[in-house]
Image (tube, coloured by chain):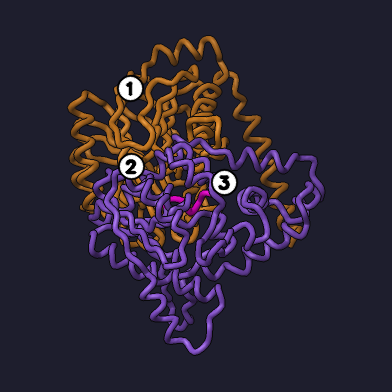
Chain colours: A orange, B purple
Amino acid sequence: MQDIRLALAQIRPALGDLDHNLALHLDYIERAATAGADVVVFPEQSLTGYFLSDLVPDVALPRDDPRLDPLREASQGIDVIFGFVEETSDHRFLPAAGYLHHGEFVHVHHKVYLVTYGLFDEARDLAGGGAVRAFDTRFGRTSMLICEDLWHPTTASIAAADGADVIYGLSSSPGRGVAGGTHELGSAETWRAINRLYASLHVCYVVHCNRVGFEDGVNFWGGSEVIGPDGELLARAPDFEEALVLATLADAPLRRQRTRLPLRRDEDVSLNGREFARIAAQRHWQDDDRG
Amino acid sequence: MTTEVDLRGRAQRGLDLEPGLTCRVLEAFIRDEIEKFGIQRAVVALSGGIDSAVSCALAARAFGPERVLAVLMPYRTSNPASRADAETLVGQLGIPSTLIEISAAVDGLLGELDEDPSPVRRGNIMSRARMIALYDQSEAFGGLVVGTSNKTELLLGYGTQFGDMASAVNPIGDLYKTQVRALATALDVPAAIRDKAPSADLWVGQSDEDELGFDYETADQVLYLLIDEMYATADLIAGGFDADLVYELQRRVVRSQFKRRLPLIAKLSNRTIDRDFRYPRDWGR
């Protein structure tokens, strides 16, 4: 991969206010570009806010919507990864992560695993995606995943097997768990473990960009971070506060770690394919049988 | 199914909280959720008890002392120590306060009744009289009402609907009573407030724990396991908790569910408020 000078834009979007959030994006993009960043990454649904409920159809956009033109324009000099809700031509609304370069979408990932339990109700308002892909950027192969996607370890495995050297995770992670004896939220602790585990075992960079602020009493804790291929923390934004944090994702540590720990070389994708295909077929048969 | 887990220990660990982190979240919550509405001030009904002391201290930290108004609203039978404790906290926090006696308003209402109302009815009238005065001060001071109901009270329904349960934002509604105590220590709430027996102070000598028939520490453990950890009542009884207490607490939670929801709306249209018309409160903010 080519070295990347990365900016994490840990923002506090307003809920359902596209104009406000667009201006916020342009401000952070400009600041990131001024700081010399090649890529700036925003959180999940950074353009719309998170707990939308019935606001979804009001803020969803097709990717060719002219309201995205200022973002496209801003991506002339810096690659922009941002979160929005994409409306398809048949009027489904999908949580999306877009990768913009030179005014064009290089790739759009749709959140595969909608989260509909506990405090979440995504499947009521949104449709889920059906693909996890790595894709080529000017810096090398990359993948984007959205929040709950990363709680299913197979998504990161697919991204890595597909050749991603950098996995971007975009989140709107609510903070919860204030148990004694630790100085961080339970949700933060889990996320940090996930990021470190994926970076270490898939021997790649993991970039986790989480938002801050509150929606209807729920806090988003921030703590965006970049983890290197050896599991080392390379950069972390503060908890709870808006921030623009810079990090360098270099090829040399990736080469060194993959030499020391050739897990990716040895990964048997065919084995995974065969076994998952077998399990899927059996499950399908069992589900049918259950009637 | 019985369990080998030490449930009491599990509850104790679960209820143990990190006060610094908790305060940080709650201060930000008060600031963020009020500032969104273009307001940077708060009013708190300060009773002299631990819950309102914690809410008040958090609000003072969130906005700075000059932007938080403590409203003291004694009734003529209120314990004078409650007012004294509230005034101590006001002095310590350096916040403005106002004293509004509710005796005339409450007695005026009581005088209109043909019969002598029960203590519960009298308590509810006092609680709702305070709500009226508090919301008036909210308008006068230009600050939103910060709530003072903790999770234990809310779950048990041990509060007056449209009375002390009324607020714009509630920083302590997800904290059990014992957790509020831990936070009070971290917030330097005076010992006199922290150490006294919890009381709604609606009649002379009232004690929450006497009236409820159980102590908050045990109740919090049971509620924590039932609500937060989703154990079944049978698990708790097998784990050594008193069966009558477990059933009583479960019954109270179920029976008071209506208090925690908006009034029911009869559904007629295709889009009914809060049923299928679902917008966030922070709509556009």
Q: Which residue is mark 3?
A: B178
- Given the image, what chain letter belongs to the residue carrying mark 2? B
The boundaries of the magenta stretch are B171-178
Residue at image position (39%, 55%) is B46
Mark before the other along the chain sequence, 2 or 3: 2
Would residue A190 be seen by someone viewing this image from the given angle?
yes
Is residue B218 found left or right of A290 in the rendered image? left
Amino acid type at circle 1 is Ala
Query: In the depicted view, which residue is nearer to us: B37 or B51?
Result: B51
Reply above or below: B176 against B137: above
Residue at image position (79%, 44%) is B3
Q: Are the residues flagged by discs 2 and 3 from a single subunit?
A: yes
Binning the other alpha carbons within 10 Å of mark 3 as few (below 14), some (14 to 19) or many (20 upward) gives many
Q: Are the residues flagged by discs 1 and 2 from a single subunit?
A: no
The prevailing secondary structure element of the residues shown in magenta is loop
Q: Which residue is mark 2?
A: B61
Q: Which residue is mark 1?
A: A247
Residue A246 pos. (x, y %):
30, 24
Rendering quarter of residue A41 = top left
User: Which circle marks residue B202 in the picture?
Assistant: none
Q: Are the residues flagged by discs 1 and 3 from a single subunit?
A: no
Is residue B158 found left or right of A246 in the rendered image? right
Residue at image position (50%, 48%) is A130
- Given the image, what chain letter belongs to the residue carrying mark 1? A
